[in-house]
Amino acid sequence: KRQRSQTIVDLTTNYLGLKLANPLVASASPLSKDIEVARRLEDCGVAALVMYSLFEEKIEAEYQQMARFFEHQAIGHGEADSFHPVPNNIQTYQDQYLEQLQKLKSTLKIPVIASLNGTSLSGWVEYGKQLQQAGADALELNIYHIAANFRESSETVEQRYLNILQELKAVVSVPINMKLSSQFSSLIHFAKRLETVGASGVTLFNRFYQSDIDLETLQVVPKLELSTPSEALLRIRWAALLYGRTDLSIAVTGGFHETPDILKALLAGADVVQLCSVLLKHGAGHLTNILAEMTQWLIAHDYESISQLRGSVSQQNAIDPSAYERANYMQVLDNYSYASGVLR
């Protein structure tokens, strides 16, 4: 049998209309705040970079603070008019973000995707326009909405996403990716609606950071934990269910730490796998290990490209399509056995 070299294995993939060298994308994280770290990510093989998010809330909070200290200082006290002189060269949080985006674009050869987290419709539109003008190759909309209002229907929640997307599509030309949570009632139907309005892709799934209760102070405190590999299966399952039912690009994020899980996501139908926690834990150098292991696996299993691999174990192409739905649940329960020595 002819021995194939690694050089003929085609790792390229298409994502949001962008041709990437491989399916590994650095997701939104503090890593993109450092130009040298971003450069090392590129050198080690990451195919695209999603920037940390631009938050409308931070922009508005900063504006209000500046207005209070500089613009309103003389109200009722004319003699205080110059107490806090307004600086001519002050650099705002928004300025810093746009400047970092421009630096990343001028430094890196890989696509740079800007992440936007807005709170108002006008904010999504205005800041989205500015991100495109600063050079973003695509936008990832991080609509971080917790549906906690009992008067708000599921239709209202979905319509908020659609309205934001529709308004932004009217003023920007770069591809728009929607970062979704796993809490939508009918995810495939909603994805089709997003596609109709103009989305280029979806990311499965956003991780809502959880609130904890301090038992001593009884305060509700934020709790941040890095992802674990157990989270990957939810993303893999929905990538498999969505593949073939839409033309949207599919990204998965959350829980992808090892090469086997990345390969499973691609087999299920993902175009790319976004990595964050594994890079924070092990550094950019871990990318070279993943790419080498992916290539070795592809060769060992007679795959010549990622495109040949992608979606081959999606629900549409799986040997047992029902395994992705209720039948899988029944099988798991039927096959469960108690540990030795456990009292029944």
Image (cartoon, rainbow, N blue to C red):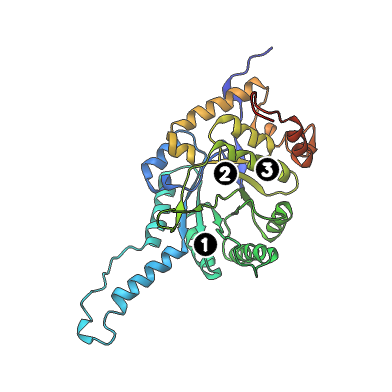
Residue visible at 68% across and 43% down?
239
N-terminal of the pair, mark 1 or mark 2, is 1
Q: Spatial distance from mark 1 to mark 2, Cα to Cα?
A: 22 Å
Q: Name the residue under label 2.
A: 253
Q: Where is residue 108 in the image (x, y as percent from the top left)?
A: 44, 43
List the residue tagged with mark 1.
Answer: 128
Amino acid on which the number 3 mark rests in the picture? Ala
**As drawn, is 189 to the left or to the right of 263?**
right
Q: Position of residue 109 (x, y in %)?
A: 46, 42
- Residue 174 in percent (x, y) is at 57, 56
Q: Disc 3 on helix, strand or loop?
A: helix
> Which residue bears the numbered disc 3?
239
Outermost residue on the top side: it is: 1
Q: Do the residues labelled 1 and 3 touch (CB within 8 Å)?
A: no
Mark 1 falls on what kind of element?
helix
SS at circle 2: strand
Q: Do tag 3 and tag 2 residues touch (Cβ < 8 Å)?
A: no
Residue at position x 44%, y 58% from top?
218
Q: What residue type is labelled 2?
A: Thr
Categorize mark 2 by other alpha carbons within 10 Å: few (<14), some (14-19), many (20+): many
Q: In front: 167, or 256?
A: 256
Q: Which of marks 3 and 2 is nearer the N terminus?
A: 3
Q: How far separated are the C-alphas under marks 3 and 2?
A: 11 Å
Q: Which mark is residue 84?
A: none
- Vertical placement of residue 29 versus 335, above or below: below
- Say which of marks 1 and 3 sits in front: 3
Q: Do the residues labelled 1 and 2 touch (CB within 8 Å)?
A: no
